[in-house]
Image: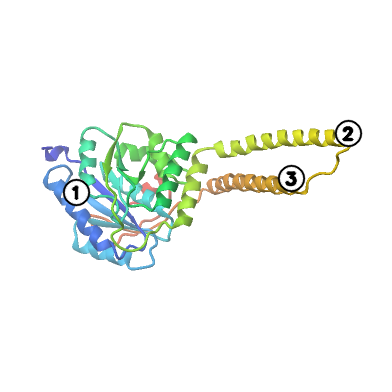
Amino acid sequence: MITSKNSPVLTIVVPCYNEEEVLPETVKRLEHILEQLMSNKLVSEHSTVLFVDDGSKDRTWELIEQYHLTHHLITGLKLSRNSGHQSALLSGLMTAKEYSDCVISIDADLQDDVEAIREFIIKYHEGYDVVYGIRRTRTTDTMFKRGTAQGFYKLMTKLGVQIRYNHADYRLMSKRTLDHLAQYREVNLFLRGIVPLIGFRSTEVYYDRHERFAGESKYPLKKMLSFALDGITSFSIKPIRLVTVLGFILFLVSVIATIYGLISKFMGNTVSGWTSLIISVWFIGGVQLLAIGLIGEYIGKIYREVKHRPLYIIESFLSADDKEVVTPRAASSHEAELQHSQV
């Protein structure tokens, strides 16, 4: 058994968006696992759960405030607007790292097995700075979702992105890992790709993923596709290189077609086929539009990066030391500004 002296301060960061239906059960389960860890001296008694309200339109923040007043382990962070899952998660991580030895991120829907948190902490005590939560199987997914997810991971790997197969954002990170994460100042966030770039000693914990406890998924197909595209274009320039290669191939095809046309003319067979002409026009036109769209994606990301807008703005912070709502002086996406904004 680990002594109290070596018990780290743990913060469990939970990004929330319209989670009023599942929040009561999430609070109950996370409090229970945290109390178990405290009783076993695996984590400090100063450990907490930090719920991050990402501009919810329902009673999510109201419930967080209530639980903060009635449950000593519950803290809260409210963003001024909906900033997206990755930005909300980052805001919680950057806030928690100021008073925590390690931080675990988990979604509020209870699909990730909270019992795996104990294994995360054990691995942390063994000297690991990053512990990835990995799904054992995808039996709970539909055939379409399972196929597209596996295809995404394989594609990212082939593009050279360091990403853990079947890992989402359920992970533990030490304070020094979070300190280095704060140095990544990019606007186009894809934490699943950024965290492995930091390095440090890492390991994996396998768990079984459950069905969503209540409410509706916040990641419909449109958002999933957008998230996948962000991940691909944020970490690899290979797609745009493929456009160059494709352009070169089409150039060679056009040269061959030109030679064929000249030979046909000299041989007196100058009647060209309507089908081949239409197919060529549509194919080349489609490739051009695809190439322009892909280039536009990269230009759009450059545009967002150079503006240096904050990823999120913190409206309120309910700390463990105070039962009143505390409003920071300012808040931003970057580490230096965050240090001035925390209470």
Give 334 or 28, whichever is nearer the viewer. 28
Using the image, tell me which numbered label, if any, was put on residue 247. none
User: Position of 162 compared to 40: left or right?
Assistant: right
Residue 105 position, x and y percent, is 31, 48
Mark 3 element type = helix
Q: CA distance from mark 2 to mark 3?
A: 20 Å
Tag nearer the camera, 3 or 1: 3
Relative to 103, say whether 49 is above or below. Answer: below
Relative to 145, say whether 247 is above or below. Answer: above
- Residue type for callout 2: Phe
Residue 87 position, x and y percent, is 41, 51
Q: Earlier in the sequence, mark 2 or mark 3?
A: 2
Residue at numbered disc 3: 276
- Asked if residue 55 can be seen in this view, the reply is yes
Near mark 3 (Cα within 10 A), the count class, few <14, some 14-19 or many ≥20, is few
Near mark 1 (Cα within 10 A), the count class, few <14, some 14-19 or many ≥20, is some
Residue at numbered disc 1: 46
Q: CA distance from mark 2 to mark 1?
A: 88 Å
- Asked if residue 323 can be seen in this view, the reply is no
Task: Identify the residue at image location x=46%, y=50%.
Answer: 227
- Residue type for callout 3: Ser
Task: Identify the residue at image location x=44%, y=39%.
Answer: 154
Relative to 240, say whether 317 is above or below. Answer: below
Mark 2 element type = helix
Q: Earlier in the sequence, mark 3 or mark 1?
A: 1
